[in-house]
Amino acid sequence: MAGVEPLKALHYDQGKVGALQDVVAPPYDVIDEAQREGLARRSPFNVVELDLPLDPAGGDPYEHAAGLLGAWKGEGALVDDAEPALWALSQDYTAPDGRRLTRNGFLARVRLAEYGEGIRPHERTQPGPKEDRLKLTRATRHNLSPIFSLTPGDAWPAIEPATAGDPWGEVTDAEDTTHRVWRVGDPAIHRAVSAEMAEGELLIADGHHRYETALTYAREIGGDDPDAPHNFVLMALVSLEDPGLTVFATHRLLKDLSTSQQEGIRDAARAGFDLREVSVGELVPGPDDPAGSFGYMDAHHMQPWRLTPKGPALLETALGDFSPSYRRLDAAALEQLFLKDAVGLSAEDIAAKKQLGYTPSAEDAVAELRAGDYDAGFFLRPTPVEQVRAVAAAGETMPPKSTYFFPKLPTGIVFNPLT
């Protein structure tokens, strides 16, 4: 496994900027224009100004972010740690079934490595987001937001004693998730965590684009020192065995469907699936339904259906070039049989979200169909973590939005200097 180490973080001085609540933000790629404006109004130091930059004078947004970061350091709003630390993170949230759960992990810096050399991806990436993040990294020379990765080992027992006191910071976000953070400076804990993380592979859960950006940036800087800061990346690490680890489903919505595309969906459903009328509350298949089962509803009839493959040969034929684990992925079956074969979308169309929308909420998907914002919706169940791990171990990557790990990680707890 790539080395897991404490970091000399750049972080907010809460005595200067106020509560952490006012300066953190959700991940940049889930923030719309209205949310960005609201976050910026909370505090002149809100991290959205760095991570999703916008120069009010119309200049280069990335250079604007770099200038702000330097100015905030000059004002004392951001301070550099003199000594390395790990940052314990505990997240209390509500699961889809109403249970209140806690996910525990920690922030650290991790030595960069090529895929297959101690770290694996599980989803495909796209060039657009990587170019954006690379420009921001070049300008600011910091990792501004953590990559979320899963570990086979569990370091939390070594870290937990350091969380007995009051947290360094606490945030409750718009989704009622409470994030608590402790700075862990004890070198003995650092050594215990590094030893626990020394074996096995990391699995990237969220942040593939940022990891690949970090690799590109490290290659650009180069040099002979393997311990140079640019050869590391900021990560939040959570054990695969953590009882609070949850994966949500991500449902697919289709818009601007032509008559032939609608007919293609109908024909593919009738040819390969048994169809059963269900209630709206039964749109999401259950864990006992066979692989490749979906809920389906269109905006014209608003009749919910359950689609169940007529036999295993359907997926074996459609996905025969892939591993057995991949062939059991609902998202892979949907992509091949309906998005590509029936609707006629290419891999590039899917990557660009052409005619596509995504949501983790079945209720929101139904509401958008009723409102006429989309023409049809496919409803999926969550992908089990074990299946994500098996597909990654086979060296394959899943279709976009195959997983929705919840809760998301806030941006702005700490930053990782790259110089």
Image: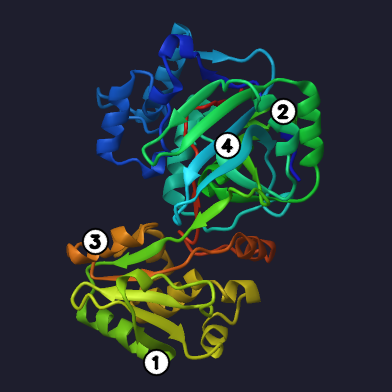
Which residue bears the numbered disc 4?
A: 217
Residue 20 visible in rendering? yes
Task: Inspect this view and state whether residue 408 appears.
Answer: no
Instruction: Give the CA distance from mark 2 to mark 1.
Output: 58 Å
34 with respect to 352 (left or right): left
**What is the x, y in percent for residue 326?**
59, 72
Q: Quadrant of the C terminus?
A: top right
| Crowd band around label 4 with a 10 angstrom C-alpha radius: few (<14), some (14–19), many (20+) | many
Q: Amino acid at mark 4?
A: Tyr
Select label 3 or label 4 by which is in front: 3
Tell me which label, 3 or 4, sits earlier in the chain. Answer: 4
Q: CA distance from mark 1 to mark 3?
A: 29 Å
| Residue matched to label 3 | 367
Q: In front of the other: label 2 or label 3?
A: 2
Considering every residue shown, the one lying at the far front of the view is: 99
Residue pictured at 61% horizontal, 39% vertical: 104
Could you tell which of marks 4 and 2 lies nearer the N-terminus? 2
As shown in the figure, which amino acid type bears the numbered disc 2? Pro
Q: Report if the CB atoms under discs 2 and 3 are less than 8 Å apart.
A: no
Please state the horizontal and vertical placement of residue 155, each as a whole percent of the image: 73, 39
Q: Which mark is residue 271?
A: 1
For marks 2 and 3, the one nearer the N-term is 2
